[in-house]
Image: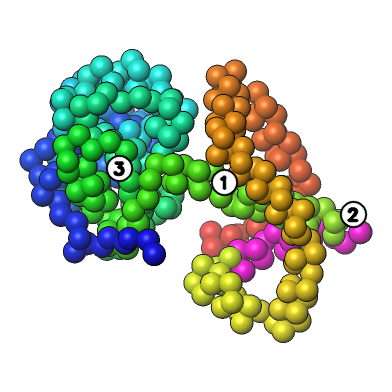
Amino acid sequence: MARIYTDKDASLDPLRGRTIAVIGYGIQGRAQALNLRDSGLGVIIGLRRGGKSWELAEREGFKVFEVPDAVRRADVVMVLIPDMEQPKVWREQIGPNLKNGAVVDFAHGFNIHFGLIKPPSNVDVVMVAPKGPGRLVRDEFVAGRGVPALVAVHQNYSGKALQYALAIAKGIGATRAGVIETTFKEETETDLIGEQNVLVGGLMELLKKGFEVMVELGYQPEVAYFEAINEAKLIMDLIWERGIYGMLNGVSETARYGGLTVGPRIIDDEVKRKMREAAERVRSGEFAKEWVAEYERGAPNLKRMLEGVKAHPAEKVGEEVRKLMFGQWQK
Ligand code: NAD
Ligand code: MG
């Protein structure tokens, strides 16, 4: 069983009186910086001068510095800029300015695990990866709760790296919910495998193809959108609250029987074999290599594929159908 840490297992003491530099004030950076400050800790922000976030961070009461300057002042450096930007910013602005004995924290293991960032040996390297979007990290904290997180230690220079990671997790509210100890390797690989096979890749294709089949059979796209895409939220909410078995108890007996008999014929062993293949491409580093090369070319394929989704028939009809619900809320 995984080791789970909660508030009683973590102390903010290792961070008290220290300077925490949050690099990046975007989705995670803003949420984590605000939570740490509300936990009574000393937070400064590191950014590019003149960027949009600079103004926002100042307006929200933070002292903002250019990245090298923030890093030089910091005992703890939280690297919360986009993963693909990190290696270059690390090489030029973070790495050379780290204090001896600093704690470096990541919210995702990608760059460390795949060797794209190589920290010096005289710092701690930890990860606190919230398992939820940044907005929730802030909203849950304000509501007195927290989003669960994974913590890991890559390099333990001080001998207290885990205590630092747990202190950060407590400061952002994650230990209120519970924090699971993992490794950079496990977090990175499961994150990528999960988003490709299931959460983003698998789910999106399942919904789109389910919609296409109904439309090709001549059903009205509006009706198909409800049945193949929109209602997926209701099913997911049930699974989120009660698990898969609990979800089955929450749908009709006909849905239960049809789902259990037909589901495995659609998502069959061949699909599972392809999931394994995709997982192996993640584990071998082949996917990371492909993605880094694509990003460095300016992500032309990503842009083209995004346009393709935008142009999919489900998008136009979806906009209309979603208005039926949201239109009422906005009145
Ligand atoms: P983001 O795209 O929201 O980050 C944008 C911020 O980074 C902005 O403040 C921008 O000004 C700054 N920035 C961008 N390039 C910069 C540069 N070259 N120099 C200085 N500042 C720069 O990023 P995010 O989605 O919050 O992701 C940050 C980290 O958190 C990543 O490691 C990501 O994997 C991880 N993470 C994100 C989420 C999420 O909800 N988005 C969830 C879990 C983990
Ligand atoms: Mg992910």
Question: Magenta segment range?
Answer: 217-235
**In 3D space, how far apart are the residues under numbered discs 3 and 2 (Cα atoms)?**
51 Å
**In 3D space, how far apart are the residues under numbered discs 3 and 1 (Cα atoms)?**
21 Å
**In 3D space, how far apart are the residues under numbered discs 1 and 2 (Cα atoms)?**
31 Å
Residue pointed to by mark 3: 153
At numbered mark 2, what does the secondary structure look like: helix, strand or loop? helix
Q: Residues within 10 Å of mark 1 (few under 14, many from 20)?
A: many
Q: Where in the figure is residue 213, as x and y percent of width and height?
A: 85, 56
Q: Nearer the viewer, mark 1 or mark 2?
A: 1
Main SS of the magenta part reads: helix
Give residue 216's mark: 2
The reply to whether the magenta stretch includes residue 196 is no
The reply to whether the magenta stretch includes residue 234 is yes
Give residue 193's mark: 1
Q: Residue at x 75, y 39 (%)?
A: 311
Name the outermost residue toward the left: 17
Q: In the image, what residue type sits under mark 1?
A: Ile
* Number of marks in picture: 3
